[in-house]
């Protein structure tokens, strides 16, 4: 497995890319980061599968990521956890993603957001 600090920075960068308009509004870019079997349980409670993503992507957000950590489950599977602050709704969520190393790159296979009342 890659050096843990390098891996942590790489996965954080991928998570942060998923918050940017360029990635979120491009089905092609999303397809490069999300595994074919990707699914998400959003903070709204809705379930989204990769094959349900519209050609215009998943919409623009204004969010800030913090408290990023990685939790290796195996050499090829990593759980990431972090906190998001949605600047538009003033809402905090706890986030977790499962990343798998396949096809010579890290791809997200699962994501979940859970609303929380505070920043702590």
Image (tube, rainbow, N blue to C red):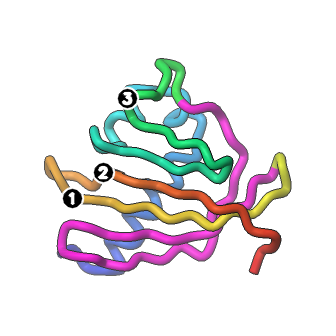
Question: CB of mark 2 within 8 Å of CB of mark 3?
Answer: no
Query: Where 95 falls versus 25 (above or below)?
Result: below
**Disc 3/disc 1 C-alpha distance (Å):** 20 Å
Whether residue 78 is situated above or below residue 60 in the rendered picture:
below
Residue placed under numbered mark 1 in the picture? 101
Q: Residue at x 22, y 74 (%)?
A: 2
Q: CA distance from mark 2 to mark 3?
A: 15 Å
| Range of residues picked out in magenta | 58-87
Name the side, left or right, on which 87 lies relative to 67: right
Is 26 placed left or right of 91 in the picture? left
Asked if residue 57 is positioned above or below residue 66 in the image, the reply reads above
Q: Which residue is mark 3?
A: 51
Tell me where residue 79 appears, x and y as whole percent. Answer: 38, 70
Q: Residues within 10 Å of mark 1 (few under 14, many from 20)?
A: some
Local SS, label 2: strand
Q: Secondary structure at mark 3?
A: helix
Decide whether the magenta segment is chiefly helix, strand or loop: strand
Residue assigned mark 2: 107
Which one is in front in this view, the residue at disc 3 or the one at disc 1? 3
Is 109 displayed left or right of 95 in the figure?
left
Name the secondary structure under disc 1. Answer: strand
State which tag comes first along the sequence, 3 or 1.
3
**Residue shown at 80% from the left, 52% from the top:** 87
Magenta-colored stretch includes residue 4: no
């Amino acid at each position: 497995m890659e050096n843990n600090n390098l891996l942590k920075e790489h996965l954080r960068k991928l998570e942060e890319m998923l918050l940017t308009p360029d990635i979120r509004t491009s089905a092609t870019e999303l397809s490069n980061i999300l595994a074919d079997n990707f699914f998400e349980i959003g903070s709204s409670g809705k379930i989204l599968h990769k094959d349900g993503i519209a050609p215009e992507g998943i919409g623009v957000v204004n969010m800030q990521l913090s408290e990023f950590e990685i939790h290796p489950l195996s050499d090829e599977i990593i759980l990431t956890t972090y906190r998001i602050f949605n600047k538009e709704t003033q809402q905090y969520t706890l986030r977790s993603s499962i990343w798998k190393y396949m096809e010579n790159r890290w791809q997200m296979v699962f994501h979940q957001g859970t609303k929380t009342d505070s920043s702590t």
